[in-house]
Amino acid sequence: MMHLLNKIKSRIKNMCSAVKYKVGTSNTKNIVFILHSNNHKSGGDKVAYRQSEVISKLNVNGITGQILHPENPSFSHEWFDHEVNFKKNLQLDPNRDFVVIPEIWVLPHAKLLSDIGVKYAIYVQNGYLTNIPMLVGHTFEALNSAYSNASLILSISDDTTECIKLAFPGLETEIIRMYYSVDSEKFKIAQKKENLITFMPRKLSSHSKMILFFLKKALPKHWRIEAIDGLNEEGVRDILSRSKIFLSFSEFEGCPLPPVEAALSGNQVVGYTGEGAKEYWNLPMFTEVYCGDIRNYVKQILIKIEQLEQNPPIDFESINLLAKRYNTEAEITSVTQFVSAVNTLSDS
């Protein structure tokens, strides 16, 4: 966890210092998601982009959705496909604009917005990062005030909701549970699966290196392990379609996306839940290993290989349940609830 926190702290240390919001005017009610502007491949950004698109397509009472990268308004993520509308300036209309702040950016953005009378929501996509503002110099009092003054708090998972309630008791009525969607039609299962194990090396790399070390001689010769690194969305889908086992190294995450995508691609998923994924890890396709239990991790991989050597049928029942839980309908329902709440706030 400390390694993760240090990476995030270094990433956000100076990102807020030059941001100066101004009062502007807008013709329509507008929900603005503010996000960082670097090329880090964040599942959270992908979710925000997608939900901003959904808001515009829903067009509830004419409410639009936009993405704003306040450090660099011309920035756009290019590692996944999207059709978002971008806000190209820092002018916000208190009567029209409603801003969504990611949990790691709550401070000083909450105060900056409050100073010009703009209402905001806090989007907590990782309950274990709600203390990040304190690790870069802000006080708990300021953080607590920012949450207390938020019009709404968005939560990406059941686990995240419990984290919010534990850290900031009394705000339960402001919490809206959000769902992301995964297009199960895009995550295909190759006609002929390969004896391939995949993983993402950017997560807990020291753990994955130990796993690879201990598997050096234990892994059957006709099996291989391949890292998913530096690929775009299509490349990730391709390799997941061909692999049989996906190794999860999720560390304290709200509701990790890669294990879902791997399972939809017909992989057996072995590894860490990151806590937030426990809401879907109960399905038979998932095998939990406690974080840091390296020997058992290796053991479970070898057990899974032995089972797959018997050519069992793919668990389509689990795949269908997972696809239903994170389908477009579930996401649209949660986004509609959020937009309706914003509309009610605007009218009050």
Image (cartoon, helix red, strand yellow):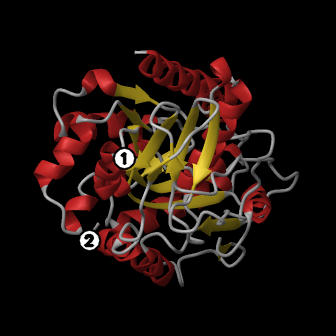
Residue 331 location in percent, x, y? 60, 29
At x 42%, y 47%, the residue is 101
Q: Quadrant for residue 245, please give it.
A: bottom right
Side of 182 relative to 95 (left or right):
right
Question: Is residue 150 shown above or below 255?
Answer: above
Q: Residue 138: give its label.
A: none
Q: CA distance from mark 2 to mark 1?
A: 30 Å
Of 39 and 3, nearer the camera is 39
- The answer to which quarter of the image holds residue 116 is top left
Between 326 and 341, the residue placed more toward the observer is 341
Q: Secondary structure beneath disc 2?
A: helix
**Of callouts 2 and 1, the N-terminal one:** 2
Is 209 left, or right, of 184 in this rendering? left
Compared with 223, 167 (above or below) is: above
Q: Position of residue 150 (x, y in %)?
A: 31, 35
| Callout 1 crowding tier (Cα within 10 Å): few <14, some 14–19, many ≥20 | many
The kind of secondary structure element at disc 1 is helix
Please count the marks in the image.
2
Q: Are marks 2 and 1 in contact (CB under 8 Å)?
A: no
The N terminus lies in quadrant: bottom left
Query: What's under tag 2, amino acid-wise?
Result: Met
Residue sitting nearer the eye, 256 or 322: 256
Q: Amino acid at mark 1?
A: Leu
Relative to the observer, which residue lies in front, 107 or 246?
Answer: 107
User: Callout 2 environment at 10 Å: few (<14), some (14 to 19), or many (20+)?
Assistant: few
Can you see residue 25?
A: yes
Residue bearing the label numbered 2 = 2
Residue annotated with mark 1: 113
Residue 43 vs 38, above or below: the answer is: above
Q: Is residue 88 above or below residue 198?
A: above
Position of the C terminus by quadrant? top left
